[in-house]
Each structure stands twice: as C-alpha cells, then as structure tokens.
Amino acid sequence: MTHSSWSLGAAMAVLEPLRAEPGPVLMALQAIQREFGFVPDEAVALIATTFNVSRADVHGVLTFYHDLRTTPALENEIKICVAEACQAVGSRVLEKALKATYKEEVCDAFCFGNCALGPAVMVNGKLIGRATLAKVAEEIK
Ligand code: FES
C-alpha cells in the first residue's frame, strides 16, 4: 500500500468529513494513518485544533492503541502472540527465533483469538496458526 507524503491540505481533506462525527479523535487518527502510513507530530496538533480537544487528549488516544504508529511502518510487521495458550505451545521459543531473524520488525501481542491454533503470528495483517519460522518466512517473501 502506498501512502501520501504529509501535507496540510491532504490532512485537512482526510479530517473534514469527520467534523460531524461525535468523538472523532480515534477515527481521525486512523484516517490520518491510512492516508500517510503513520501519525506525524503535525497531525496531533491539527486534530486537536480541528476537533477542539487538547493535544494531550489526542496524544492519549494515539499512545493507547498499539496499532496507531508515530513513525513510518517497517517493511514487514510481525506480531507474535505471547499470551498463555500460545506460550503453552511454544510461542516464546518461536519469539526468540523470530527476533533473531527479523529483529525490530517483531513485536509481542496478547491473543489474536486464535488460541486453539497456537502459536499464533500475524504477518502484515495476516494471521498464521501453528506458526513456525518457515511459515513466517513463506508469508514474508
Ligand atoms: S493465546 Fe495466542 S491467540 Fe489466544
């Protein structure tokens, strides 16, 4: 997916349709991220001004939701479930192997609702059950 480079005009075009929405901060952050690939610092101030909320309110929502990012996305996003059911079937061992191979592209997550097919890994939004290093590598290529 390609994203636009940041511009005030493009950001306003994304935010304008949300003016009539009640409590639009989360929707505004998601819309900005869809457009630009992440939420730049400039967008926090713009959302606060546009929707008459404090920058702290916007920052609070931005930092609460892990899927909202403040930096451009890496080439691949790999999330591994480290909740109990997946740990019981080896997610911590797989986590070590993934982090050794893919380093900063790997982050921990807590339950994708795929507990019966653990260890569960999500690669660029696609859920992989009974995940292995080979299955992840296959998904990335
Ligand atoms: S515990 Fe891993 S998907 Fe639920």
Image (cartoon, rainbow, N blue to C red):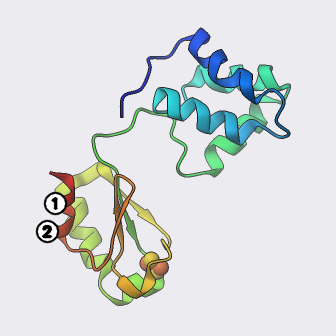
Residue 72 appears in the picture as rendered? yes
- Taking the image as shown, residue 7 lies to the left or right of residue 115, namely right
Crowd class of label 2 (few under 14; some 14 to 19; many from 20; radius 10 Å):
few
Residue position for label 2: 134
Q: Mark 2 and mark 1 in contact (Cβ < 8 Å)?
A: yes
Place of residue 134 in the rendered image (x, y in percent of width and height, measured from the top left): 13, 68
Q: Which mark is residue 4?
A: none
Residue 83 appears in the picture as rendered? no
**Amino acid carrying mark 2 in the image:** Ala
- Taking the image as shown, residue 50 lies to the left or right of residue 79, namely right
Crowd class of label 1 (few under 14; some 14 to 19; many from 20; radius 10 Å):
few
Place of residue 60 in the rendered image (x, y in percent of width and height, measured from the top left): 71, 43
The N terminus is located in which quarter? top left
Q: Which mark is residue 137?
A: 1
- Give the quadrant of residue 129: bottom left
- Give the quadrant of residue 119: bottom left
- Quarter holding ligand 1: bottom left
Place of residue 102 in the rendered image (x, y in percent of width and height, measured from the top left): 21, 54
**Amino acid carrying mark 1 in the image:** Ala
- Taking the image as shown, residue 78 lies to the left or right of residue 36, namely left
